[in-house]
Amino acid sequence: MTKESRIDKYWVRDKTFYHKVLMILIPIVLQSIINQGVNMMDTIMVGKLGEASISASSLANQFYNIFVFLCMGISAAGLVLSSQYFGAGDLKTVRRVFDLVLQIVIAGGAAFAIATFLLPAQIMRIFTVEEDVIQLGAQYLRVTALVYLPHGISLVLSNVMRSIGNAKLGLYVSIASFIINIGANYIFIFGKLGAPALGVMGAAVGTLIARGVEFLFCAVYLLKYEKILRYQVRGLLKAPTKELFGEFRRLGLPAIISDSLLALAASAISIILGHMGKEVVSAYAIVTVMDRMATVAIQGVSSASGVIIGQTVGEGEFDRAQKEGWTFLILSVLIGILGGILVLVLGEWSVALYEIAPSTIKITISMMEASAIIVFFQAIQSALSKGILRGGGDTKFLMVADIIFQWVASVPLGALAGLVLGLPPALVLIALRIDFIIKSVWLVFRLKSGKWIHKAKSMEEREPDRS
């Protein structure tokens, strides 16, 4: 095999492919930057109120993030199916996929809202034993209860719209959210323009207003301006066909379980760090913001690979899907290197933006250094597990990988390191993210095997076209 033919096996040369990648990647990267900018501004504003306030909002958001991860799993399930059916030219089934994922997120959002409103203090006690943090977090959660439904619907809609080539909706929604959320936070946290100074609860009010605008933006666009899918809301009243539900259970349900387990693992991490003290929690909240800023590009690559490979599999071009998978993996390695460098260069600088104690600063800087190592492996495993292999329908295998490496390795090792051995927070963070390292290696072999491609079956029973 010549050098050029070996390159052709692993690298797509077609310019059309990279144009498709950029059309999805650029809006997602910009959207991620905006979202992380909002998170950073939230943390900075709340940080003006002290470490207890940072810890309260951070830990309260860990429970909310369980719902967000659930929505991401629902989105991923919908994305796998809708990308493949869109690639096969089956718009009728794509509409039914939209109906199904929205039905699920509405039911889940209602359940989370009720639990959060009725049991805010009990939820906070799962994460911490410090009473001042519990009381502040409970105030935050009561307002958050109203956020679940509008945010869940808009999040799932904007994500699944990528399956039909529309990655810009999420970007536009994020721009509107960025402006409104920062303005509302400033008004309600500090009591400006005649509004009461609500402190931590003001951050939740700002989030509620922003998420409400997001929901209206998505709903108006989908029902009035979207011209490919031509979605109609009456589909929400229809039960899914037996065939579609079977395919959703086969290819989509494992993605929901996988992301839900990821959310529980993230909560377990917060519980472990929460019992190491508010200084560690505050440091982790700051490190998380920088970590997410450094990995915005990989989020774009993961999303683009899932959509494009899903469409390629739907077209039946399995050899091309394999080559595209290798190309996306190479891109993720390059982005992981750049992300790690970014954390090292900007991490210590970002700490100066927060008003925290010298002891917390020291912890934060050490955790930043550990995060720089983690980011490299995070990029690789994210591209493989959340994009390439998931786009190929390999969701059951990925679910098993998540269960094994999160719950047999990361969480037990992190608990041992932090709560039993009392190791430094930086080493605890590496232990808690050991699954990223293991999965990065294991999933490369899965990609090489070619066994990750699973095409959705054609629907045997067709419904009348609603367009």
Image (cartoon, rainbow, N blue to C red):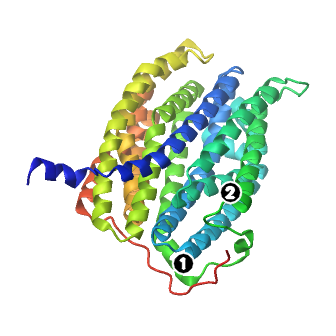
Look at 52% across and 66% down and name the residue there: 82
Question: What amino acid is found at the position of numbered circle 2 in the picture?
Answer: Ile
Front one among 64 and 2: 2
Locate residue 219 relative to residue 83 in the image: left or right. Answer: right
- Identify the residue at the far front of this view: 15
Residue 68 coordinates in the image, percent (x, y): 61, 50
Q: Residue at x 49, y 71 (%)?
A: 85
- Residue 199, by quadrant, is top right
Residue 254 seen in the current view: yes
Q: Could you classify mark 2 by the number of other residues whose Cα lies within 10 Å: few (under 14), some (14-19), or many (20 or more)?
A: many
Write down the quadrant of residue 286 in the picture.
top right
Q: How busy is the neighbourhood of tag 1: few (under 14 within 10 Å), some, or many (20 plus)?
A: many
What is the quadrant of the N terminus in the image?
bottom left
For marks 2 and 1 on the same chain, the one whose residue lies earlier in the sequence: 2
Label 2 SS: helix
Q: Distance of mark 2 from mark 1, alpha carbons? A: 21 Å
Q: Which residue is mark 2?
A: 153
Q: What's the amino acid at mark 1?
A: Leu
Q: Looking at the picture, how far across and down is residue 333, in whole percent?
A: 31, 40
- Callouts 2 and 1 close, C-beta under 8 Å: no
Q: Farthest residue toward the top?
A: 358
Give whichever of 55, 462 is nearer the camera.
462
**Residue 234, numbered label:** none
What residue is at 38 percent from the left and 41 percent from the top? 379
Q: Is the residue 164 above or below the residue 200 in the image?
A: below
What is the x, y in percent for residue 452?
32, 64
Q: Residue at x 53, y 20 (%)?
A: 350
Instruction: Name the image quarter holding residue 72.
Output: bottom right
Asked if 444 appears above or below 467 in the picture, the reply is above
**Residue at the left extreme?**
1
The residue pinned by badge 1 equals: 244
Front residue of 80/120: it is 80
